[in-house]
Image (cartoon, helix red, strand yellow):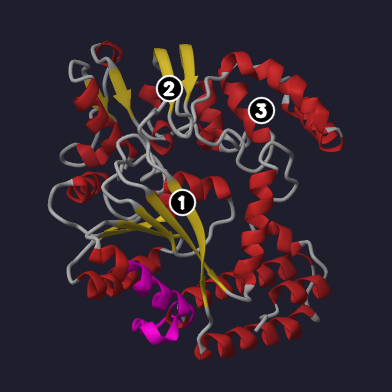
Amino acid sequence: SLIANWISELKAFAPSLKYFAAHPDLHKPGRIPQLTAAELDHHDLIITTYALIQRYKWLQEHSWNYIILDEAQAIKNPGTKQTRVVKKLQARNRLIMTGTPVENRLSDLWSLFDFLNPGLLGNSKEFGRFSKKLAKNPQGYAGLRRVVSPFILRRLKTDKSIITDLPAKVEMKTWAAMTKKQTILYQEIIEGIKQSLQNVGGIQRKGLILSALMKFKQLCNHPSQYLGLNHFEEKESGKFQRLREICETIYEKRERVLIFTQFKEMTGPLAYFLSTIFKREGLILHGSIPVGKRKELIARFQGRDYVPFFVLSLKAGGVGLNLTAANHVIHFDRWWNPAVENQATDRVFRIGQQKNVMVHKFLTKGTIEEKIDEMLEYKARVANEVVAASGESWLTEMTNEELLKILTLKI
């Protein structure tokens, strides 16, 4: 998706640059021709992905003038192969772009600067000790900012001195009630957890909790997702009912909407349900759709013909795309990191948007989704502090009593 977007931007703003897209889906017969050093130098720009740079030695071995990382949070984990390969690339100049330099931990920032200016923030262990002290003494952040600020150019879309014509963004929590079927199944899961927690410990206990958590999230979306069924009735899901209410208003205004879900298996049922509301087909994008096809889908949605909705998986469609034809965003289920959700919203709330943007974050009343929302709000407040646990792991560290209190359905 990102490669196709960059190609579109190049054609619009720098058509004279000679580029080569190093991705098999953009070449026939699905293979990239290996370029020699001289052939690489003949191009102004090579575009590839973090995954493919690990595969192609001829890209790794070249000496570059510039290496530019888009969505640079992809190298936030120093121990991954992806990060190690990228950091070994040779270049005279290095530049990164990211909207989320700190997603979960302050060590994310260290890893980015280890690529840009190795040694500026010390080694990983030294920075780890430093960041622990910051948790007890937040005043120390001023010193860290003084060190890194000369290397950072920050731009906010909300800064009217930079962007004078960007419309407003309104974010709201959209609550859905549990249906009778959802309530019964939710209680059944809780009873099963109560019994199982008495007999497991250690890694098995963590696995049990994470498995149950996934079941709760699926059930809050729709009982059929949790049960593995193919038929999704509107009356069985509070979220589907709320989705109809919102989308009927969007349809009346002839506006467009993006719907994000973390579950690939929900993209199809959501698209079918939405087609009954908008009286026409929409589009779907998830990780299994080839890169070439994604470019076509984006062009269709951004085109003049009215395509009312676009259902996207959060990971495949949440970064790098320009989808300003929509001015409504619905987060059908919640991810563990507010930065990831914000990036998805920014597919719409960006330069080129002409209308006010409405963002709905779906929550099922009285369920674990309320606790996830509280955790997301906390993470947003402490984005510049060290967060010891990320994602769903915070639940696995609770006592049985604390866990059951969190999971209990409040009706």
Q: Disc count in the image?
A: 3
Q: Which residue is mark 3?
A: 110
Q: Amino acid at mark 2?
A: Ile
Task: Tell me the SS state at disc 3.
Answer: helix
Q: Is residue 235 or residue 51 the one in the foreground?
A: 235
Which one is closest to the eye, mark 2 or mark 1?
1
Question: Is residue 401 visible in the rendered structure shown here?
Answer: yes
Around disc 2, counting alpha carbons within 10 Å, would you say few (fewer than 14), some (14 to 19), or many (20 or more)? Answer: some
Q: Amino acid at mark 3?
A: Trp
N-terminal of the two: label 3 or label 2?
2
Q: Amino acid at mark 1?
A: Val
Judged by its main secondary structure, the magenta piece is helix
Q: Is residue 368 or residue 130 the one in the foreground?
A: 368
Q: Is residue 183 left or right of residue 133?
A: left
Residue beneath the point at 18% across and 20% down:
15
What's the CA distance linking mark 1 and mark 3? 33 Å
Residue beneath the point at 62% across and 61% down:
373
Which one is closest to the eye, mark 1 or mark 3?
1
Residue beneath the point at 58% across and 90% down:
184
Residue beneath the point at 78% across and 61% down:
397
What's the CA distance linking mark 2 and mark 1? 33 Å
Task: Tell me the SS state at disc 1.
Answer: strand
Around disc 1, counting alpha carbons within 10 Å, would you say few (fewer than 14), some (14 to 19), or many (20 or more)? Answer: few
Res 170 label? 1
Q: Which residue is mark 2?
A: 68
Q: Is residue 185 or residue 176 the one in the foreground?
A: 176
The reply to whether the magenta stretch includes residue 105 is no
Asked whether the beta carbons under mark 2 and mark 1 sit within 8 Å of each other, the answer is no
N-terminal of the two: label 1 or label 3?
3
Question: Is residue 119 visible in the rendered structure shown here?
Answer: no
Residue 88 image position (x, y, % from top left): 53, 22
Residue 212 image position (x, y, % from top left): 63, 74
